[in-house]
Image (cartoon, rainbow, N blue to C red):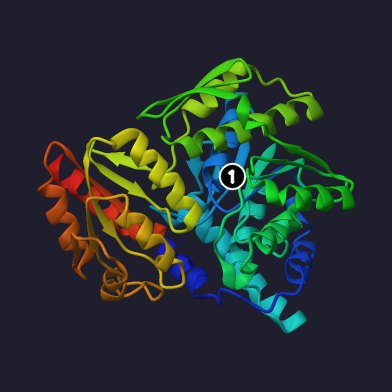
Amino acid sequence: MFNTLAAAQEWIENIHRFGDKLDLTRMENACRMLDHPERSFRTIHVGGTNGKGSTANYIKNILVQAGFKVGIYTSPYVVRFNERIGIDHVYISDQDVIHYSNILYQFWYEYEQIYHDQITFFEVLTLMGFLYFRDQEVSYAVIEVGLGGLLDATNVIVPEVACITNISYDHMRQLGNTLESIALNKLGIVKEGGVLVTTIEEKSLYPLFYSVTARKNARLKIIDLTQVSGIHVGEITTFSYRDQTYQLVLPGLHQVKNAVLAIEVIRYLRLKNHLKIRESHIFQGLFETRWPGRFEIFTDNIILDGAHNIGGFEALRQTILAMYHDRYVKCLFCMMKDKEHVKIIPELDNLVDEIYFTEIDYPRRANAIDLFNESFHPKKFVHTDARDIFLSLSHSLQKNEILLVTGSLYFISEIRKIIMEEKVESS
């Protein structure tokens, strides 16, 4: 039995990450044994390559503004383990993590004895979210897909509406090496007779979206982004969509797309379930959304962004050019070795004025020297101690300079801890 969050977290994070998965049998069996907690609340399913967390939070915050009690399940976390599961604006408490970890610890062994199979890390987390939302009697839960869609642990839900943000190259080992194979996996969240809303812009994928939804008798809405106008990207981003003007604290052109997707999901829910959601709820829900590590700005000149794939870096590039085209950009970069650093580093070479390659104490991280050797930037440097080089760079920034910290959510999580420690020490 666990008595501390640290002990519960250690058990969960040491459960094997992946099991043999040809279908959703493990999760379906587990949900049935737990009396189907996932059926006790209405759900919205959020899939895609990038922007899932932001979109999920936009949807959640709009529903909260309208007076609903709303669960949210996202991954991974940036600051604290508890970030994965929340209700309204509050993350699950340490005591509740301990409570549900003890329930699932016993259940894990019971399942193994019955089925001679082991529930995986992400399946345990997903079950924890389901149980917590059921016990807290939420009206809606916004559920972010972990990886892919078709065989993701979250795909046991039958949502009111599903949405897909975009399709880009990531997790190719699991999802395939083409956009079509990645898209097909992500389209696995479409249910028979369901609804899919999407902001995909890759027109080559439209036939696949149409065929999959038609085969499942599902309704498809591909959002017309030409209806977005008046975009101004800054620390507060403004835009107009369908004759309404909105403001975002999360900066970037890609956040406009995520927000529009959330708006259309909410408008569908409002019609389907006759919900009393006003335009003021939508405006305020979007404006109040914050998301750690997604173009997060500290002291006006330090930016943390967890971009770790081609699509994420394209969004990051657009935002840097829109907001800081006249500033000198230093970049502190660390990436996981299983990501596409060979494709991403040339993008950075063409974007920033200096690159500092580093690494963190994490098994999957790439070697800083290997990353350094992949770059052809005239001003590139390597420092294997991430803490030391971050402190050195951040403390010596000039007025016209910004420091961009990027490449991995795991990396920026470590850097963010350093920033918060310094804030505490200086207060």
Q: Amino acid at mark 1?
A: Ile
Q: Is residue 170 above or below residue 214?
A: below
Residue plotted at (79% across, 58% down)? 35
Residue plotted at (30% across, 44% down)? 303
Q: Position of residue 386 (x, y in %)?
A: 23, 64
Near-viewer residue (345 or 415): 345
Please give the residue where the numbered disc 1 appears in the rendered image: 72
Q: Exactly how many numbered labels are in the figure?
A: 1
- Does 395 sit left or right of 37 as displayed? left
Q: Is residue 315 above or below residue 249?
A: below
Q: Position of residue 97 (x, y in %)?
A: 52, 57
Quarter placement of the C terminus: top left
- Does 6 sit left or right of 100 as displayed? left
Is residue 4 in view? Answer: no
Q: Position of residue 270 (x, y in %)?
A: 74, 26
Is residue 388 in view? Answer: yes
Residue plotted at (61% across, 61% down)? 147
SS under mark 1: strand
Near-viewer residue (295 or 53): 295
Q: Position of residue 220 (x, y in %)?
A: 79, 40
Q: Residues within 10 Å of mark 1 (few under 14, many from 20)?
A: many
